Amino acid sequence: MDMNYDVVVVGAGPAGLMAARKVASRGFSVLVLEKEKDLGVKACAEAVSASAFETAEIPVTQSLISNSINGAYVYPPDESKGVKISGSSYRGYILNKPQFLYALASEAVSSGSELMMRSEVKAVKMKGTTAESLVYSHKGETREVSFKYLVGADGVGSIVGRSCGFDAADFEIIPTIQYVMVNCKVPEKDFIRIYMGKEVAPLGYAWIFAKNEYVANVGIGVRGAPAKPYLDRFIEAHPEIFKGAKAIKEGGGAVPVGGQIKETSKGNVLLCGDAAGQVIPITGGGIRTSMGAGSIAGRCIADALESGRPEEIRKYSGAYSEYWGTRISRSLKVLRAIENLSDEDLNLLGSVLSGEDIVDLANGLDVMRVVAKFSRHPVLAMKIASKLL
Ligand SMILES: Cc1cc2nc3c(=O)[nH]c(=O)nc-3n(C[C@H](O)[C@H](O)[C@H](O)COP(=O)(O)OP(=O)(O)OC[C@H]3O[C@@H](n4cnc5c(N)ncnc54)[C@H](O)[C@@H]3O)c2cc1C
């Protein structure tokens, strides 16, 4: 069976569902292909800032969230130097991510997109630099679909990225493992908890995000060593929270932390979200940045289709960089500056930085304000500020 659409989107995650909705709402035909039989199968810690709902263009409703977040505790190796981050600008949510994705899917479908589950893309057929069609398997049956534009929103290891010749040289991932745990005694359940240090999580961090009074997402990202032993050790080291707790579900996955790939569009193909490395490197937060990418990509494709000027899709990269791309590259710079700090230096950071400083650094916001603060400190000036200037 041969089918033809204006746009085919591969992957029904935050990026793909936003892209599909934006194109379909302008009246063009869109097919979303998703290999899984459900949405939100991938493990995720599900934390977003409150503004993620603005990016998603859906109202916050109780059914889409598990918990409201009023701040964070960030712990250096010496946990007595933990920093509390609180204030109205640091509000957020622990999503019920499957329900959140259903809401995004609902918007995409009501805008006119077709969403086909259990449809795994196996190959992209190219003619020169133009992608012409996709071969996918739907419930075991091989099918082909052609299109004018293709969106690769198929996450880490994107088949679209690999098949269409995108340069993934800068793509870097951190492997993660996460348990969904019951019977955890998390104090202040409306505060997420982050733990750092070479012994705790080399080149990464451990997290405890309470979903409700019973359940917490407990995970770790570690580079250069297997993550699971570190997570088990972390849990053992915190009996005040985990004594009597039980892991119900184990999952994991790779999070891109190397920043955006060099080119996010090529010929008639655009990459969005994890597929393009569009994740805040220090936090590993990619839900909002991926939705932002899908939204802009969808708009640029609709502009190209409407005007008949294919070059409109080239505006995607610049438009994304204006806000999101800049934050990603600043956060990457900070990651490079702090990733090899000793536990002693991290403790020092814990005693010098305020909650606002940490948020600005991690998210690539007002980095220079924090650098000015470092400059007044002899050790931090040498070890960090010099790398950020
Ligand atoms: C353990 C863990 C915890 C995380 N915690 C957070 C967090 O708390 N907050 C946050 O903001 N971010 C978090 N992230 C990152 C976040 O999950 C991603 O950045 C975000 O989901 C990226 O969205 P996406 O749409 O680009 O890709 P994905 O969500 O990965 O979606 C890609 C989709 O494409 C589908 N697909 C892949 N290949 C094919 C194919 N060949 N054919 C058809 N379909 C295909 C997949 O099944 C999937 O549905 C976490 C990630 C991990 C692994």
Image: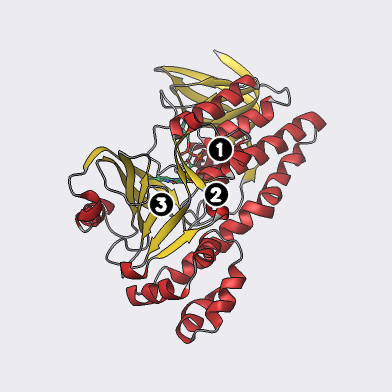
> What amino acid does circle 2 point to?
Gln
Where does the C terminus fall, quadrant-wise?
bottom right
Q: Quadrant of residue 308?
A: top right
* Residue 234: percent from left, percent from top: 25, 56
Asked if labels 3 and 1 touch by Cβ distance under 8 angstroms, the answer is no
* Residue 384: percent from left, percent from top: 49, 76
Q: Residue furthest right?
A: 307
> What amino acid does circle 1 point to?
Ala
Decide: few, some or many residues near mark 1? Use Cα within 10 Å; few <14, some 14-19, many ≥20. Answer: many
Q: Quadrant of residue 164?
A: top right
Check mark 2 vs ligand 1: CB closer than 8 Å? yes or no: yes
> What amino acid does circle 3 point to?
Ile
* Residue 104: percent from left, percent from top: 56, 29
Is 20 or 75 nearer to us in this picture?
75
Q: Is residue 384 above or below residue 64?
A: below
Please give the name of the residue rendered at 47% of the width and 54% of the height, measured from the top-left corner: 71
Whether residue 252 is visible: yes
Q: Mark 1 sits on what residue? A: 15
Task: Identify the element where label 1 is drawn.
Answer: helix
Whether residue 341 is visible: no
Please give the name of the residue rendered at 41% of the width and 23% of the height, measured from the top-left corner: 37
Q: Mark 2 sits on what residue? A: 278
Q: Mark 3 sits on what residue? A: 192
Asked if labels 2 and 1 touch by Cβ distance under 8 angstroms, the answer is yes
The numbered mark, 2 or 3, whose residue comes first in the sequence reads 3
